[in-house]
Image (spheres, rainbow, N blue to C red):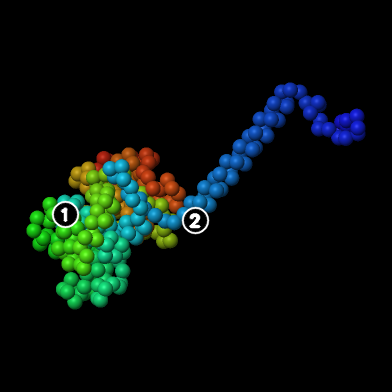
Amino acid sequence: MPRTAGGAFTLADDDRTPRARRWGCLVTLALVAVTALGGWWGVRRAVDAWSPTTCEVRAGGKSFTWAPDQASNSAVITAIALRRGMAPRAATIAIATALQESKVRNITFGDRDSVGLFQQRPSQGWGTVEQIMNPEYSSNAFYDALEKVPDWENADIAHAAQEVQRSADGSAYAQHEAKARVTASVLAGYSPAGIGCRLDAPKTPGSPQALVTLIAEDHGVTARVEGNQVVVDGATDEQAWSLASWGVARAIDTGVTAVVLGDQQWTRSKSGSALTWHGAGTPVGARTVVLSLG
């Protein structure tokens, strides 16, 4: 290795041609870039791994977050309203009510003997505890009472909710109207691709037949099993998007790993990309919903 006049060692750059030096610089820069990229991906994966599971709904320039169980319960509430032929406004009223009563969680406790999503009381004729703890039953019970409210379709949301619930402070329901309205719009299919959920991978594979049964129970439509997928067709664009959005919202319960509608797809993951839809690798019919189970 060459030495300076003082005897110190020097790098042997003088032994390389200018072209070789240029290539050396390029290789060094490439290694730095790869290292930085690898570090960035590592940080991103760590962030995704530690980020909480969550769902997001978006419509009309507004967005709101839900815990996965809350999103799933909201999907049941909305589907039952649509199955009964009620306008999405009914779901808005019901979700706002459940937000105030239970934070849209199917809880086993409450004031006196109140339980469930709407804190319905067995002693007041709402049903047995077992019945009320079934989200489909409790949603139907709520709508049975709502339909008896005069002109509920045009009534103030807080007023309609209070007429059903008869709570101590009926004005409290109004504070939840914006979140309930956006959520109902998305889950009723009026705001396409408006929901995404970042979720852990299913602990066990979902059951296609159980999913078919649940779709019939919530939406009242018939789906079919094709291998590890469940396929269901919407009668309208709105119903198709309602079914697809329901599939995302209820993935925490069903083990659904992907939902495809037309040329759009939601893919389950813990990554932030799971909060949005993207182009489908294998597009399907414009009103055909395909739910995949891992």
The three-letter amino acid code for the residue at tag 2 is Trp
Foreground label between 2 and 1: 1
What amino acid is found at the position of numbered circle 1 in the picture?
A: Asp
Mark 2 Cα within 10 Å, few/some/many (few <14, many 20+)?
Answer: few
Q: Secondary structure at mark 1?
A: loop
Give the image location of residue 266, x and y in percent.
36, 46
Could you tell which of marks 2 and 1 lies nearer the N-terminus?
Answer: 2
Q: Please report the residue visible at 16 percent of the width from the left and 73 percent of the height from the top.
A: 125
Q: Is residue 190 visible?
A: yes
User: Which residue corresponds to mark 1?
Assistant: 156
Q: Quadrant of the N terminus?
A: top right
Residue annotated with mark 2: 50
- Pointer 1 local density, CA inside 10 Å: few below 14, some 14–19, many at least 20: few
The mark found on residue 136 in the picture is: none
Q: Residue at x 29, y 45 (%)?
A: 59
Decide if residue 228 is in sight here: no
- Above-or-below relation of 20 to 40: above
Residue located 24% across and 76% down the image? 113
